[in-house]
Image: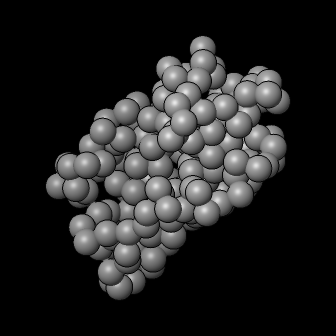
Amino acid sequence: MSITIPRPAESEYKPFYHTYISMVPDGDLLKTLADQFEAHAKALAQVPADREQHRYAPDKWTVAEVVGHLADSERVFAYRILRFARNDATPLPGFDEKAWTPASNYAKRRLADVVAEFRAVRQGTLALLKGLGPEALIRTGTANNSPVSVRALAYTIAGHERHHMKILKERYGIGA
């Protein structure tokens, strides 16, 4: 089965996520998710070992922590997609990435290993999305005290990655 994921209406998510969703180009979202990951993985593979744990400022994340944050966030967004797509109306809590990242082990891991973990997460996300029917895409639930649709979460995943890769390019010189 082939699935098309239409762009969500602004009423399907809280305004905070518009920044991410607006970064996603029109077209096939599944192809965008697959292609952008591969392009970003290629750029990250070029990072010298001595730059993997670079921070552009003392209180900022390392390159490996940024990539780990992308994997962690995608796991959360994909879990929300699963719950809401399956018609589970249980409200889901938010998460505090500022607490999660220091508690992770990403700053002590090789970047290639973190990228490999992120790849596994992305493959799982793509498999989940490919299995959804059109009716599931418009289902909504509550996450972090706000209503959100399944398709808005899918677009958020793509836009969130673009946002952070833009930061890695501008502040860390990755993919430049």
52 lies above or below 7:
above
Residue positioned 31% across, 69% down in the render: 144
Residue 133 is at least partly visible in this image: no
Residue positioned 43% across, 66% down in the render: 95
Q: Position of residue 52 (x, y in %)?
A: 73, 34
Residue in the foreground of this view, choosing between 161 and 68: 68
With 59 as the anchor, is 44 left or right in this view? right
Residue 103 is at least partly visible in this image: yes
Residue in the foreground of this view, choosing between 103 and 130: 103
Describe the colour scheme in one phrase: one colour
111 lies above or below 75:
above
With 154 as the anchor, is 49 left or right in this view? right
Q: Position of residue 126 (x, y in %)?
A: 60, 54
Residue positioned 25% across, 56% down in the render: 13
With 83 as the anchor, is 8 left or right in this view? left
Image quadrant for the C terminus?
top right
Of all residues shown, which one is farthest toward the top? 176
Q: Position of residue 114 (x, y in %)?
A: 74, 48
Residue 110 lies in quadrant: top right
Image quadrant for the N terminus?
bottom right
Residue in the foreground of this view, choosing between 153 and 67: 67
Of all residues shown, which one is farthest toward the front? 58
Residue in the foreground of this view, choosing between 100 and 58: 58
Residue 62 lies in quadrant: top right
